[in-house]
Amino acid sequence: MKKILLFVVIAIVSFSSYSQSYSHIKELETKAKEGDAQALYELGNFCYEEDILSKAFKYYKKAAKLGNVDAMAQLARIYFEEYYIKPNYRKALKWYRKAAEGGNTEAMIMLGSIYTTGLIVEQDTVEGLKWYRKALELGEVGVNRFLASFYENGSFLKRDTSLAIKLYIKAAEQEDEKSQLRLGDYYKKGILIEKDHDKAVYWYKKASENKFIFQNSYSRSQIEELKRKAGEGDASAMYELGNLYSDYWYTMCEGFKFYKKAAELGNESAKQRMYDFFHKYEQCSSCMVKDDELFNWYRDAAELGNYDAMIALGYIYMYRDDVVERDTTESLKWYRKAVNWAIPKQWSNWVRYMIMVFY
């Protein structure tokens, strides 16, 4: 009965969402017929997302001719990237310029790239830099990264590694995640700059925080609040910070530290995550734990219902007498618990085989 009710609820919600979407499209079509440029642009986006490219092209073209700068940029992109029509670089350049002059930063960046690299036009670094700077003035912080890579590699602009690093740092300070990652790598490996472990970790953490903010709709102030609470001993905040930093391999150990602290304070979610980390410990010296400590985390996770940890305990009690005294009864208990927990079929069959052969 509960399953039927759940299905009905899902069906109602799905139908409601579809109805709202359908009514919104019909409303846009009505406005588009009246010459509404924004409605035409949004219909173009809808068709583009649904892979109805011929219609998307028509909507963008109509909206662009009515002065919608975002539609101009999309139209230029279609002419430039040859989706389903023959590329027309002359028209692409024309619409990119119109969009850029209308304030579209994506078009400004494209013009910057086109002129700086000499792509489809005669190379003109002065014109290219002009458009990059305009985009930068309007808040496109990634532009500093583009320029930094040009100066770093000496491609299209005279090589200047000192200026490249300054631009990477400037972009990173403006919360450009890719620049933060690059600085983390460069400080870690000593590329262009002197090795500095602390600075590498700093930029890696900043990149992790930015990714977490983007994926979870957090704000920078909310992350600072989590840090404050964690510093005061709040296990839930520590667990959230563990989630934040464990998302990237280069801040994995920072995540581990927060999970460990939260688990030691009794946070059950953190205890389970401690087990999930077992195969990653050796990647970082700060994540190393002794076998007996690791065994305790396995037991905690198993008691909370983690079937992977149950299997691990079964194995340890049977084969790892260097960790715990061999106990076939205890081993069998955990293997049986794992089977009864409805583990995935491939694991279930393997555990049943272990029980049959060894017990």
Image (cartoon, rainbow, N blue to C red):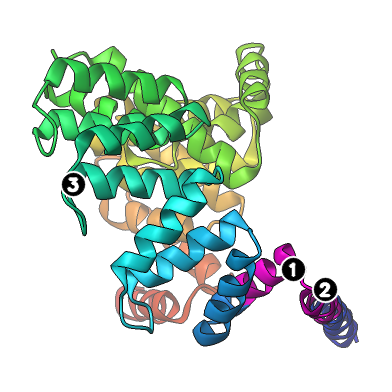
Q: Are marks 2 and 1 in contact (CB under 8 Å)?
A: yes
| Left or right placement of residue 55 versus residue 100 in this view | right
Image coordinates of residue 348 in percent, x first then y, are 45, 77
User: Which residues fall within the magenta stretch?
Assistant: 22-46
Secondary structure of residue under mark 2: helix
The residues tagged by marks 2 and 1 sit, at their Cα atoms, a distance apart of 6 Å
User: Helix or strand or loop: what does disc 3 sit on?
Assistant: helix
At a point 65% along the width and 36% down the height, the residue shown is 218
Instruction: Answer few, some or many: residues within 10 Å of disc 2's Cα (few below 14, many 20 plus, some between 14 and 19).
Output: some
Residue 138 in the image: state x and y as whole percent: 53, 31
For residue 116, say whether it is visible.
yes
Q: Earlier in the sequence, mark 1 or mark 3?
A: 1
Magenta segment main secondary structure: helix
Residue 117's disc number: 3
Q: Identify the residue under disc 2.
A: 31
**Identity, as a three-letter code, of the amino acid under mark 1:** Ala
